[in-house]
Image (spheres, rainbow, N blue to C red):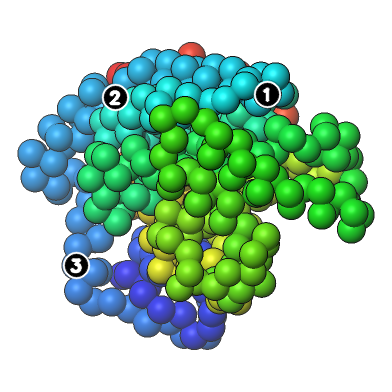
Amino acid sequence: MYVCELDRPWLETPFMLQGFEVENDADIEAVMQHCEYVYIDLMRTKVVRVTIDELPGSFINDKKRAFVEKDMKAADSTRQNTSNLIKSFIDEIRFGQSLDIQLAKNAVSDCVANLTKNPEAMMFLTRMRNKGEGLNQHAFNVCVYSIVLGRLLGYDATQLEQLGTCGLLHDMGKVTIADEILNKPGPLNEEEIAIVQTHTTAGRDILMSGRNIFSGTVDVAYGHHENIDGTGYPRGMQGHQLNINCKIVAVVDKYEAITSPKPYRPAGDHLSAVAILNQLARDNKIDSSLTLAFVSYLGIYPPGTIVELSSGEVAIVLESNPRQRLRPQVLVVRDADKAPTQGFVDMSEKTVDDNGRPFRIVTVRRPGDFGIDLSQYYDIIMLAFNS
Ligand SMILES: [Fe+2]
């Protein structure tokens, strides 16, 4: 059965999105723990009850082909190039030199190509964090997420390049903020908050004085902290005064910030970030339809999410199964005693654990929990994406 609505807000339950499939008694128990009754979508029930084995052969072939075509290496070299470019931009800003925005557009063009070819590999890379690459990684991730959202809106390649460039360069003004403030291991005081907020005007000025400038990047650097209800900064503009790229970057920037580690707190987990985004949308701070589109795309367990399984094992989500979004393909990295192990499991095929009990994801963990560093599994993950 496909549950399409609950008797209470989704946010009050662990079932974060608009619907899910009930597959076994354990799922029914989970629903009963949180709800008195739920609504079943009979039309969708028919579709989601089809198992992988029952799918037409063409679907399976397409799926296999999609696996083979994935090219994590290309995605990773795009990330490296983009990362190197941002590093050189940071140096140029520090030395008072003007940026060549065309270089950013070229790098973003590669990101667009890779995202079109292999979105999951690119999304996975946004979860792999290297120490000391805060601004750099944030720029790349916001660029990728912006392009993802633009694709959902039907943007063409040129529009995606422009949007991705806006995402990549939105926070360049942060280079002008002292590291002691950006890396302060505690809450900022009022004066420090005011200083951090100047990164919007600083970003505008830096991008306006660049070469081959694209005005969209200036608008987004200046406007990505404005809120739909006019309570943002620096100008207190309202939703109707903000362009769409500004609104897109505002949504994905917040998601990226919440899921990144900060000097004063660990990275937030995916579901908490989704809950916060939904709340911001309800409070009219960020655009609600853009938020819904982005959150729906990410799903419940996006690639790179660390999940704990009903067996007690801990795994990294590699890829979602489009027909069974609650049962992704995972790399198990901790056994039931939380000791290191390694094993690939397609949860759409394995529905009971080794003891015959229902096998499912029970919770999402934060990046870094159990000492799991995604980059340690880079080679294995590469193999999984290429095999
Ligand atoms: Fe910002």
Q: In the image, which is nearer the foreground, mark 2 or mark 3?
A: 2
Does 10 sit above or below residue 196? below
Task: Tell me, for residue 96, which label it has, or none.
Answer: 1
Q: Residue at x 19, y 67 (%)?
A: 46
Task: Work out whether 83 lies above or below 19.
Answer: above
Secondary structure of the residue carrying numbered label 1: loop
Residue at image point 25% right, 69% down: 45
Mark 2 belongs to which amino acid?
Lys
> Sequence-wise, which precedes: disc 2 or disc 3?
3
Q: Taking the image as drawn, is residue 142 in sight?
A: no
Relative to 191, is 375 above or below?
Answer: above
Q: Residue at x 33, y 29 (%)?
A: 109
Q: CA distance from mark 2 to mark 1?
A: 40 Å
Instruction: Judge the density around disc 2: few (<14), some (14-19), many (≥20) Cα neighbours within 10 Å.
Output: many
Q: Nearer the viewer, residue 267 or 11?
A: 267
Q: Which residue is mark 3?
A: 46
